[in-house]
Image: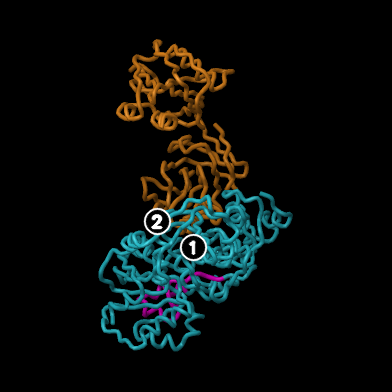
Chain colours: A orange, B cyan
Amino acid sequence: MKFEGRCICRGKAKGEVIKLDEPLSFLGGVDGSTGELRVREGNVAGKILVFPKGKGSTVGSYVMYDLMVHGKEPAAVINENAETIVATGAVISSIPMIDQIPSVRLFEDGDIVSVDADAGTVDIEGISYKEVVSSVVSKNGKCILEKRPSTSRSYPGYWSLVAGKIEAGETPVEAARREIMEETSIKVGEPLGSMDPLYVREGKVLFKVYPFHFDSEGQEPVLNEENEAYVWASIEDAKSLDTVTYTILVMSTFLS
Amino acid sequence: MYLTREEESILNGEEGEGRQKAMELVTALGKIYGADSLIDITSAHLSGASYKTIGDGGLKYLEDLVGGGAKVSVPSTLNPVGMDRTRWKEMHISEEFAEKQLKIIDLYGQMGIAKTCSCTPYVGPNVPSMGDHVAWAESSALSFVNSYIGARTNREGGPGALAAAILGKTANYGLHLDEKRRPTVVIDADIDGSIFSHSLLGQAVGMAIGSGIPYFRGIHPEVEEAKALCAAMAASGSIALYHVEGVTPEAGNYDVSELEVIHIGKKELENAYDKLNTVDDVQLISIGCPHLTEKEMHQIAGFLKDKEKKNKDIEIWFCTSAEVRDKCPEDVKIMERFGPVLADTCMVVAPIEGTFERTGTNSAKAGNYLPTLCSQRAMCRDISSLMELVI
């Protein structure tokens, strides 16, 4: 699966992913002579190092140079947003680097990835890709959460927004309306809001999630067979339930 | 980003690997910050001079640059280093550190960079003019030339400023552009005119706004007060430019009537003071962050002239540039009775953590960095209050 990013430092590399979910300070975060990470287990040497962005001391650029001097530098660096410290370190150490990929959540440790920084592309091998919608259907600051049955293939027993796959030929907003109608019998109008797509990995499948916000317009859900229960939940209510990834983030964006 | 044919050819390596790497770095940073083109600079000031801050990775980087024949193409100065070049033993510096530090200074010299190492180059060897585009690192110095002189620079990092110095160009974004130099908030300051109060004012403003471009009313800083204000705001926040009504050259360009107004007075200064003071007794008192000017040297020598150092347990360092030290031999004689007048270094970039645990300073900037970069507990008071501890 190939994604477009932006070239920060030219070059090509292929290797295994090591991923951090938090911003990284090379100073203190990585041993400059061995490549060992100090913020989690693992070593960056020869790996495709994926993290959201750099932080911390500007000396971090020289730590990256130190890694290169010792032959322990990552094969490539992938960031969501490049900043001065890591970009400087990558350029002075000639480490291929790309930023503006949609999310570090595209990646999992051990993925085999080809980086072509000249073209600004990242190719994750052996994963499939699904586009889905996820809608906040709201009433007075609360929205519908549906409980997935214990036999569900994805997140069994978890609470979810009104969600489903985008079918061939459908736009995301059409898919959102259809799913709401199928799962709750509620007919919604134009969306009150939308967000940039979110990404969720489940094993070898990557989901691209389009969030929407609709008004329930006073209608009460009538569930079909896909879910076993529903509640009208506030953000606080949702925090005490087992919810699907991003549920709280999407609710907070639309309902706060 | 638009590049001229000449800039393209540098990027493609036609002028050698050293200039190619410099161009890769300047264009990469320009891309990140949305620059539309490169812009010629008239000077550079570089950080990354102390062996303590750049380590073996930085030393190797400089060796490789020099090996590749890199030279700066505009007048360039260097930040303070980790020790006085000749008096490092008085600073408890190890032989190994001294050897590597001298190597670093030599490598910068081979690239054509002036070997005077100061955080206040604007009082001597490197004085930009109003409207000049420059590439300066060192947060306090770049804020001074932006604000007090009206030159234009972003907050450059060490390697970025060096790359710009090699090319004589930097990326055109941020504070190089008119519209990015507009004030974002008005600060009504109610303080006395002392240097120390300006330091605390800077601390309070950094704590209050973090980043942005403050427009001050109610103060009339001269060079020394402006220097203290710059340094404090760049350390407690990330402020790289400010305006002072009736004082700084660009202040009159802006209508600030619609901006939010923040009042900073006695209470805010007390909070800033409390934040900076975490210890009541010290082993070292270090004065000169940023480096002492001639005027400050005269003031300190005048204060100490008839006094005697009674408490021998506390060491005192005075930090300035070699140039300023050479200009004030009479003052130096008096000050040396209390402690060494060290040139081209300071307590923040020197490896004091191996010797001291508690340090006193008159600088809000040092007060911010002593705990984080030097593992010290810090005391921050005005110079005469600090001297009371030893006389």
> What residue is shown with label 1?
B139
- Residue A79: x percent and y percent? 50, 44
Res. A91 image quadrant: bottom right
Label tally? 2
Residue for point 52% across, 66% down: B144
Which contiguous range is marked in magenta?
B77-101
Residue A234 against residue B149 in the figure, above or below? above
- Residue A185: x percent and y percent? 44, 11
Q: Is residue A225 left or right of residue B77?
A: left
Q: Nearer the viewer, residue A126 or B4?
A: B4
B282 part of magenta stretch? no
Q: CA distance from mark 2 to mark 1?
A: 16 Å
Q: Chain of mark 1?
A: B
Q: Is residue A231 left or right of residue A48?
A: left
| Label 2 or label 1, whichever comes before in sequence order | 1
Residue B175 against residue A110 in the figure, above or below? below
Q: Nearer the viewer, residue B60 or A216?
A: A216
Q: Mark 1: few, some, or many residues within 10 Å (few <14, many ≥20)?
A: many
